[in-house]
Amino acid sequence: MKAGSTKSMAVGLVVGLIIGLAVGYIIVEQEVGRLEAKIERQEAAISRLESQIAERDSLINIFYSRMKETGLISSSGKAIVDTMFTLTDLDGHRDFFADLKKDEVTHVQIHVMGAPINFYINKGTLNLIQKTETLSEEFAWTVPEEGRYVFRTELKGYEYALVALRIAPWRIMLGGGTAGQEKVTIEAVEYDGTTIAVYAVNTDEGPDVVITGAILRDSSGSAIEQIPIAVTAGTLRPGILTRIPCAFTSLTTGETYTVALVSSKGNQFVSPSFKV
């Protein structure tokens, strides 16, 4: 009886040991799995951080490259807003204020990396909204009335957005970007009741600037009509004032417009605002 009992105890101990080892192995496996998952999460976080740093560096390079190339300046040589900042879900939005004159054509450059943002120009009931979901966006906007305006960048539902914002009165527009630099000044715009004539001059000493199209925009900066320009009519030789006829069909008497000349390299040169 003793021998049987001892044998049973031994078997029980062996079975318990095996079960204990099995349970211990499962626990160790689970712990190893948790550690591996934690390491994977940390590696993923590091990868995201490295990607964000690379994106930030890329945007900074693009932004400052654009600043050097475009020569976007006002008549006084100063931009209204010229800044780069990181917008997070903690601060939500940034506001920038400026006093603008009626019918002044304002050029906006906005570069965004990391998340889409909302961009507003506000004054009273005026709301011009651009939802930026791409790397960069540019547009012209004609000031409807004199007064103080607020330019707001707003982030909702995202961790961060790296924003480069440049706003200036569009007295002079110099072409830029990867398309190559071109320098064109629009001296005047005339309307004879049928055709708009844009007087432009190539202010560079380099090659001819070839205008291939024209865009008619209303006072809010929205494109109304786009037409082609023949090479024979749109070739701007250095230092020569050239008359470019633009046969727009969407003009309304009493309304205010601007015309953007588009070159073969993709650059745009915007006229002062005018009333028909």
Image (cartoon, rainbow, N blue to C red):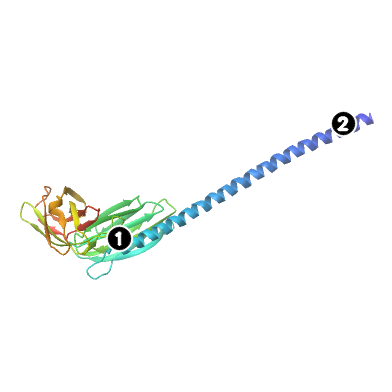
Q: Is mark 2 on a helix, strand or loop?
A: helix
Q: Can residue 86 be seen in this view?
A: yes
Q: What element carries label 1?
A: strand
Residue bearing the label numbered 1: 151
Under mark 1, the amino acid is Phe
Residue 203 percent location from the top left of the image: 19, 64
Query: Disc 2 and disc 1: Cα gap in Å?
Result: 85 Å
> Residue at the location (80% across, 36% down)?
16
The image quadrant that residue 270 belongs to is bottom left
Q: In this view, does 232 lie above or below 68?
A: above
- Quadrant including the C terminus: bottom left
Residue 206 percent location from the top left of the image: 22, 62
Q: Residue furthest left?
A: 193
Front position in the image: 226 or 80: 226
Front position in the image: 83 or 4: 83
Residue 9 left/right relative to 69: right
Q: Earlier in the sequence, mark 2 or mark 1?
A: 2
Residue bearing the label numbered 2: 8
Residue 67 left/right relative to 191: right
Front position in the image: 230 or 132: 230
Residue 177 left/right relative to 190: right
The image quadrant that residue 188 belongs to is bottom left
Residue 32 percent location from the top left of the image: 66, 45
Tag 2: Cα neighbours inside 10 Å, few (<14), some, or many (≥20)?
few
